Amino acid sequence: MTAGPARAGYYDGRSSKRHEVTLELSGATLRVKGHGIDLAVPLAEVTLEERVANAPRLMHLPRGALIEAAEFAGIDELIARGGHRDSLVVRLQGSWRAVLGSMVAVVCVGVSFYLWGLPWTADRITDAIPPAWTEALGKEAMRGVAAPLFRPTGLSAAQRSQIEQDLAAALGAVGAPMPKIEYRRFAAGPNAFALPGDTLVMTDEMVALAQSTRDPAAAMLGVLGHEYGHLKHRHPMRQFVRGSVLSILIAWWIGDVSSVLATAAPLLLATRYSRDFEREADREAAALLKSVGRPVEPLIELFGKLEGERAGKGSDRPSRFADYFSSHPGTAERIRILREAGR
Amino acid sequence: MDQPRQAALPLAFTGSGSEYFRIWIVNLVLTILTLGIYSAWAKVRRLKYFHQNTRLAEASFNYHGEPMAILKGRILALALLIAWNFAPFDQIWGLAIGLALAAVWPWIVVRSIRFRRRNSSYRNVRFRFDGRTRELYLPFALLLGVFLVSAIVFYPGSDPEGAGVSGAQIAVGIIATVMLLLIWPHFHFMLQQFSAAHTLFGETRFRFAARAWDFYRVYLLLLAAFAGALLLLAVPFVVIRETGGEGDMATIILVLVTGIVLFYGLLLFVGPYFQVRFQNLIWNNLSLGEHRFESHARVWALFRITLVNLILIVLTLGFYRPFAVIRTLRYRIEAVRLLPAGDLDSFVAGSEAAVAAFGEEAVDLFDFDLAL
């Protein structure tokens, strides 16, 4: 069997000088010939480096010499005779079928981790977080509930104690602890939310909207029950941890191309987890109302008004666009959940 | 000048997106299947691809890192990371692990550079590194000290009752922060010089002629860009405050979004700016024996590449990334040229024992890259 001759570069390993040589394969011997060089190396002593796509092939000879060959028909012969088979990984890299299969596998693993693996892992992490951390995070979140968007409440002490009495009575009936309530005026309209730990924030605007329903006390209890549901299931902390894990994974996946993308993508993807939590909180709200014999209809009426309020503000476009990445499920679905759970 | 006239030799990069994509996806799947263990082999295959496709004067570079050495390094680094993550649970433990990390950090940095140099070769001659850890202790201690003072004063948790920070505390904090800003460019310069001037190709040493002021100049412009960006970001908040927060929601959102888009636009520009300016600064001041280097990368060109990469990465949900890496690498590598003072044949190989990979892996995991 013969192959070659082919041109190649020879480096003796002692200096950086490139020697132009020709390679020839005859029998079980590699002949390397050049100016002042004439080697006959048994194939068994030639170590062929793994193929790196279309980069020149590298062959290590005894005593640290190296051959760099851009093209050499004898390579295949060398592979066949010297037992230098391309490794499995190299063969996978060269096969479009394997590459397509890998792409499908990566997508499947990614999607299932997003749907099930990440929530599960993040919740185990949340379980391991000491209460002191949660508390510190809650305090940090309270700092965010400040000017310019947030202002001190305009509710009277009597209004506030009425709200708290109603909630305490309902929670007492189901044997649940009473959360702390912070009241604020909020420039962005009616809202209420739960913070990591045991604090929930109620806005004057939300209280006013509840007042406009047919049964303000029940509507108010529904809203508070919803937020209490978030606290009971540690939703703020779980959402925080899930978001953090998502951020790390996304940053790893997209690399360091853009901080915008690394920030925005996890936020959008985390809305899925948030919608699940909203559904759970709605069920808690319905259960709490049911336990004190109150109807869910006032809360449903409130959701309707809330939607009207948001659609009415500004132009329709931004709110419709926001629906695609909304942190909450659609109002129709929420009403269905309340009806089912309140039955 | 008695040097013979020689044509500049450009670095060439022959990697292609479709080739690298296949290497990348196979690496990814095997890493997932082996729960991360394969990542060490993946790293070697990736770096071999980059090195072997970088060519200068008809010859390619090569990478020789041993996957097992890298794996051991990654396991040790992971252990350190876990130990560090338990730090907040217990003050004594936190302090102990913090001090231990601070003490070994210069050593980790030196090991990291040494592993990378020792495992790179060109024309069958290895690069080497002979920097010593003790040279780094004083600069690292100084930087860490200043950083701790500024961090402790301004860390939100240091004021749990919201009682307000005293005037003296604020003064100390501001002085420390200003000192940090003043020291950092010099520290960066020192590290770069340390890493370059202790590098050898065979027996021939690299020299680094940049001065500290060159680094300050790059940072000053960067600082100006950041100040501008912060001002832009402040505008929407001032607008909201002026309207008393009573303004129409759509306007507030519009103003906020505009501010954030402007800010991120600038951030997007800062990355390429930083990469290009330091790449040019470093290579234009680097020499190897009598040979010199030249880098003429342009911020605007790299910004355009970065922007296109970003758009395509979004559109392909991340699968364009290997192509993006290749495009960026090609631009950055092909901007560099060697200005030879003679032929490249007379470098003599040196000898040095193999080094463990731990340093490099620790640096990778703790996200502290000393890009050269």
Image (cartoon, coloured by chain):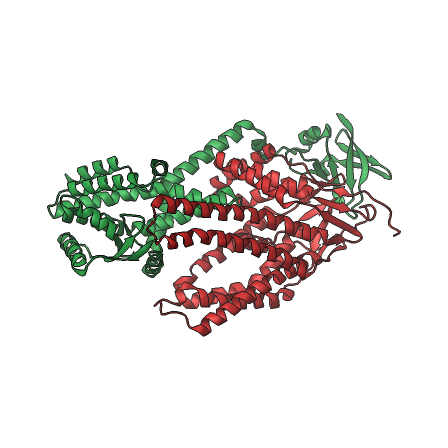
Chain colours: A green, B red
Residue displayed at 18% across by 37% down:
A340
Q: Residue furthest right?
A: B2
Q: Is residue A51 left or right of residue A299?
A: right
Residue farthest along the front direction in this orientation = B243
- Residue A205 position, x and y percent, is 25, 50
Query: What is the residue that sits farthest to the bottom in this orientation?
Result: B168
Q: Nearer the viewer, residue A140 or A247?
A: A140
Is B73 left or right of B253, judged from the image as shown? Answer: right
The answer to whether residue A291 is visible is yes
Residue placed most toward the observer, B169 or B317: B169
Please, is residue B352 above or below residue B140 in the view? above
Q: Position of residue B258 (x, y in %)?
A: 45, 45
Question: Looking at the rendering, which quadrant does residue B200 occupy?
Answer: bottom right
Which one is nearer the viewer's eye here, A210 or B83?
Answer: A210
Quarter of the image where the C terminus of chain A is located: top left
Residue in the foreground of this view, choosing between B168 and A287: B168
Q: Position of residue B100 (x, y in %)?
A: 51, 65
Q: Residue at x 59, y 30 (%)?
A: A94
Q: Is residue A215 left or right of residue B122?
A: left
Q: Residue at x 53, y 30 (%)?
A: A98
Count of marks overlaid on the render: 0
Residue B348 showing in the rendered view: no
Judged left or right of residue B304, residue B98 is left
